[in-house]
Amino acid sequence: MEKTKKRMNIKEQMKKGAALLPWLLAVATAVVLFLLTEICNYNTKLPQMEKRNIAMNVAILFCVLVAVYVLSDRWWVSIGLSGILIPILGIINIYSIQFRNTPISARDLFNARSAMNVLGSYTITWSKRVAFAAVVLLGLCAVAFLCFLLERRKKHTWKRWGIQLAAGTALIVSFFWWECFAPNSIKPKNISTLRYEEGYQVYGFMQVSVEVFQKAAYKVEKPEGYSREKVAALEEKSQNSVEGAGLGNVAPDISGADIFLIINESWYDLSLVSDLTTDVEVMPRIKNMENTLQGYIVEPHISSGTNLTEYEALTGNSLQLMQGITPFNSLHMEGATSIVSCLKEQGYETAVLHPESRDTYNRIVAYPAMGFDSYYFIDDFENWEYWEQRTGYVTDESNFNNVMQVYEKMPEDSPRFFYNLTTQNHGDYTLNSYWKSTVHVQEEFEDEWQGYRVNEYLSCVNLTDEAFGNLIEELAGQERPVLVCMLGDHAPAFLESVADKELGPEEMAMKLRSTPYVIWANYDLSGISLPEYIGLPYIPAILVELAGAQQLPYYAYMIEEMLPQVPVLTAYSQYRDKDGNYYTYDEESPYKELLQSYFYMEYNTVKGKDGRSDTLFHLSENP
């Protein structure tokens, strides 16, 4: 009898142990997946990561496992599904960082087609990280099979499943409330807006990804203290204000010039962050061009995010309020306040040309919604040209030739606004045979392929210089006043590997995002000066001012009140004033009220649920 009882006790203990084992395996799986996500995220600071951040990342992954478990009532399904999907996510992240120097995020979910279009131009290589992810995937599949053997005789009961669902949901909701949403949440604010190393590598991939998803869900963050009454006060102030020259100088004595806005793919000046020398000058024509304004535009992102640049440059809205989204995919652009809407109210004919697929970043929907009268993509022309083996990207020379073809067919009895987004300088930069490069860096690189990349990239920039010079020569002969602005959309993905590591963190964060700008006109610009570094949202107001067109009160506020005091407005939680001092948007500063007013207006024009202002975002009277 006693032996029978002992056997029964042993069986009960074994049964309890068998029930507990999958939970222990799930915890171990969460730890392994944490290590996997950090290794795939190239986290060189993993050994120095704080224990609290390690625990939070493991807890997030464990919550993912619990969520799948409570839905399926089987640990083998939870571990098996997570053990397949998260390693695949890790492998994708390896290539995302390799090609774009940025981890994947919520916005990439909306850009799968765009990503696939770009991926074809890169060389996919096998690496130790990819091999590690593959080993983890196979190992977790084996763990899932072990759980299957333990659970194969487990009977499903609706009562137990309901209890598990309620308990699991309570656990997950409580954790994420405590972690992210509570007034005093333990997760620091705005960790996703820091530089890659300062965000993902300090706080962990999963913890930062949760914030990115959180902000993407909100789409547009409501500024602290916002109310319709405060917007009404800004409306009254704009009606009583006296318009000045706008740029603090002598405005051009012209009215309604034709405007060209060119966003040039990956156009960057490497001398900004490195002292590399070349055998020939990279941008001789642009650097020596007369009657220009030149400097650097501070972009919202490093090494990727063309659509982010487009949005800020066309609308004047800072993405500081819209972290984690892809604007053309996430926002309704119908009737959006922009340089297009401003100029169309003044009788401008508007056109856009982008030598790429019309479906990329939802541009075929966004451009007409913004009010462009005509829009052209790669399949609208057959005369495109390419440089050697870089057959995925139209040359700037060929692109500008078609721009002029469209421009000359536009009605001449009205001023014209032409927006052009180029593709020539897109990575990868190992597409040509190495001897095809026309510009060569004199310094040697430890990685020979890095040297090939830099040489091919600088050769592309040299082609841009030649093509832009030819475009300006052609436009110089126009009888109508013409204003041209060209700026880069972001730096090349390899930039941080050649950047001077001695730059301070604030300078490094800004300069990695600072692409060149050049503004030229066939009329006198000598009475105008601009800051060397300018926040991208100022571009619409600057171009409208320099073209002698009428300003929206929203843009007038930016150019008359903000630009002289805070020339560098960024989308990564900090800004720089006229004296070079850095501040965060959250801290007290002499400019906090100035910037709050701007964000109130921006939120009103983007959201407008409580009544979008007609006064601030439309002209008082059409010319």
Image (cartoon, helix red, strand yellow):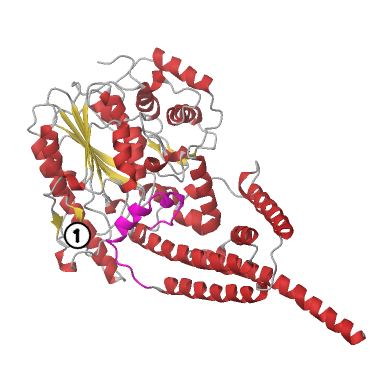
Q: Residue furthest bottom?
A: 3
Residue 435 appears in which quarter of the rendering?
Answer: bottom left
Q: Residues within 10 Å of mark 1 (few under 14, many from 20)?
A: many
455 inside magenta stretch: no
Q: Quadrant of the N terminus?
A: bottom right
Can you give x and y, in whole percent of width and height, for residue 281 in the image? Answer: 17, 54
Q: Which stretch is magenta?
A: 101-126
Residue at position x 39%, y 58% in the image: 501
Residue 591 versus residue 294 in the image, above or below = above
Count of number-bearing discs = 1
Residue 206 versus residue 573 in the image, above or below = below
Residue 601 versus residue 500 in the image, above or below = above
558 vs 206, left or right, is: left
Q: What amino acid type is highlighted by mark number 1? A: Arg
Q: Residue furthest top?
A: 240
103 inside magenta stretch: yes
Residue 249 seen anywhere in this rendered image of the structure: no
Residue 239 appears in which quarter of the rendering?
Answer: top left
61 vs 545, left or right, is: right
Q: Nearer the viewer, residue 458 or 112?
A: 112
Can you give x and y, in whole percent of width and height, for residue 38 in the image? Answer: 51, 64
Residue 492 appears in which quarter of the rendering?
Answer: bottom left
Q: Secondary structure at mark 1?
A: strand
Residue at position x 15%, y 64% in the image: 436
Residue that label 1 marks = 390
37 vs 64, left or right, is: left
Can you give x and y, in whole percent of width and height, for residue 123 in the image? Answer: 29, 67
